[in-house]
Amino acid sequence: MRLFEKLAHAAAVRRDVVSSGGLVPFGVTVERLLSPTEGLVAGRRVILGGTNNYLGLTFDQTSIEAGVVALRSEGTGTTGSRMANGSYAGHLALEHELADFYGWSQAIVFSTGYLANLGMISALTGPGDVLVIDGDCHASIYDGCRLSGAEVIRFRHNNAADLDRRLGRLGERAQNALVIVEGIYSMLGDQAPLHDIVAVKNRHGAMLMVDEAHSLGVLGANGRGLCEAAGVMDDVDFVVGTFSKSLGGVGGFCVSPHAELGLVRYASRPYIFTASPSPATIASTRAALAALRSRPQLRQRLWHNVSRLHGGLT
């Protein structure tokens, strides 16, 4: 049992919460989903306040039907990675549609958003390279940094001046650095000052990756995220995102204007050694992306609800 000893503190905290009559906030069992925003928990109808289903597309009938058709025609899964088993037509179609959506030339689909960050960071950087990341970046970004073996430098959250200082200390090495920020920070809910971040990275010749997991479908005139809303698309090298929030599915991606992006497929262990997304997942995601592009009222409804809730709480 020695391997479990490191988890003793977590067990003690959980035991204290349960013994005090409280509800354990993590891993709640949702007995039945009733809608994109409601479910049964402990027999009670509750609002699912922790959901990332920003546009409500998990119950979108077009997405559901697309998934059902793919399930019946192509089966339940791919049973292997794209490098070993090949890419299905749906994988390639989704990559083409993502690239077109962002107005860039290249896109790669990963099996999850977590793996997208792991796969991109560890393939692009290695020993001798430098990663300069916002201190409050998501765990998947930190894990990608560890997997890469590159030197990792953190700058103060949303502090472009601190980023400038740290890149300045690198001298010419800054030109071999990858700066990573998030569009909307998942733990804090605030936005990166992208105008300032872009100005700094351009001054030092670094490259910039933006994780738009929580801003895809939420921000920008076309729902592309904070890069679009801030008007800095032309100054960003990589956008990483997920299908598990606004698009209501599961999976991840990276898009880029750089023609060399496709080479990542041959160096990314999370891409090479993971089974690819199922046909049903790809089909429903393609339908959800089409809905995001053609139905701006989804985003308008979201912001109406945000305003209503915020107004009621203040």
Image: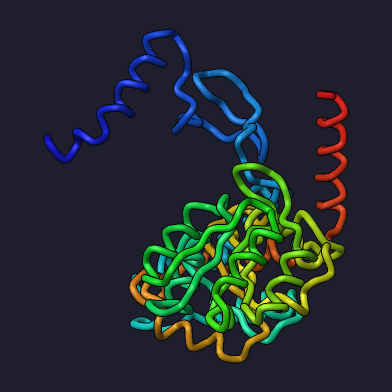
Residue at figure coordinates x 52%, y 87% from the top left: 262
Residue 37 percent coordinates (x, y): 67, 36
In this rendering, is residue 88 above or below 21? below
Residue 148 in view, yes or no:
yes
What residue sits 74% from the left and 77% below the top?
235
Res. 183 image quadrant: bottom right
Q: Is residue 262 left or right of residue 95?
A: left
Give the image's coloring scheme: rainbow
Task: Tell which of 212 and 295 is nearer to you.
Answer: 212
Q: Residue at x 59, y 65 (%)?
A: 166
| Quarter placement of the N terminus | top left
Name which quarter of the figure residue 103 lies in. Answer: bottom right
Looking at the image, which is closer to me, 48 or 128? 128
The residue depicted at 82 percent of the width and 61 percent of the height is 220
Residue 61 in view, yes or no? no
From this viewpoint, which residue is outermost toward the top?
20
Q: Nearer the viewer, residue 73 or 279?
A: 279
Q: Does 257 appear above or below 283?
A: below
Above or below for 128 versus 43 = below
Instruction: Indicate left or right for 119 with 35 as reference.
Output: left
The residue at the far bottom in this view is: 259
Relative height, residue 59 to residue 217 (above, below): above
Instruction: Indicate the position of residue 243 as horizontal and vertical percent values.
Output: 60, 60
Q: Residue furthest left?
A: 1
The image shows residue 161 at horizontal and vertical percentages of 70, 60
Q: In the picture, which quadrant includes the C terminus?
A: top right
All told, the count of numbered labels is 0
Q: Is residue 198 left or right of residue 110?
A: right
